[in-house]
Image: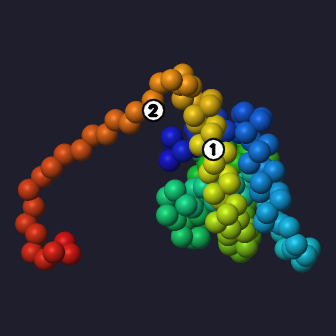
Amino acid sequence: MASMVIALRELYCNKVYRDRVLDILESRPVKGKSKTGRPGMELWTLFVLAQIRLSKGLSYDGLHTQANYNKLVRQVMGVERLSGFGEVTFPYQTIVDNVNLPDDATMKQINDVTVSFGHGEVFKKKETEALSLKTDSFVFESNVHFPTD
């Protein structure tokens, strides 16, 4: 969780890429929606919660818990306050109504922006140098009874 929050923080601190992500979010999920009076959330908060839900595979209950009680997540969303100074909380239904607004096409566009951010700003490589990946794995003996195991 900490590495994902660090990546989100780096993205937020880079104004160019942050504005690109927020422009994509602003043009897609709320386009054509009527104002129904339901409480919403800021686009950055929506983006952070959507990223956490997708990367961790959380249910809306788990996401509700993370949004309201995980200080690290709340800090990167920008809603963590010192105790006693107007604590911001998110009702369950607000999370459900807002986090699922970005569709697959929107998330693909955001993914393209974040990948270009990673290649251009975080992992600055020379144009002639190829990207490389290191992995670590291990093998252990197991007792497999069925081909589906």
- Residue 125: image x %, image y %? 53, 25
Regarding residue 87, the answer to whether it shows in the image is no
What type is the residue that disc 1 sits on?
Thr
The answer to which quarter of the image holds residue 104 is bottom right
Residue 19 circle label:
none
Q: Residue at the location (86% across, 67% down)?
A: 31
- The residue carrying mark 1 is 114
Residue 131 circle label:
2
- Residue 115: image x %, image y %? 59, 43
What type is the residue that disc 2 sits on?
Leu
SS label for mark 2: loop
Regarding residue 72, the answer to whether it shows in the image is yes
Between disc 1 and disc 2, the foreground one is 2
SS label for mark 1: helix
- How far, Cα to Cα, is label 1 from label 2? 17 Å
Q: How is the structure coloured here?
A: rainbow
- Mark 1 crowd level (few <14, some 14–19, many ≥20, 10 Å Cα): some
Q: Residue at the location (78% across, 66% down)?
A: 29
Taking depth in this image into account, of 134 and 54 the one nearest to the observer is 134
Q: Position of 89 compared to 31: left or right?
A: left
- Asked whether the residues under the numbered discs 1 and 2 touch, taking CB atoms below 8 Å apart as contact, a structural biologist would say no
Q: Residue at the location (58% across, 52% down)?
A: 70
Q: Height in image: 7 above or below 130? A: below
Q: Position of 89 compared to 120: left or right?
A: right
- Residue 103: image x %, image y %? 68, 67
Q: Height in image: 139 above or below 6? A: below
Q: Residue at the location (54% across, 45% down)?
A: 4
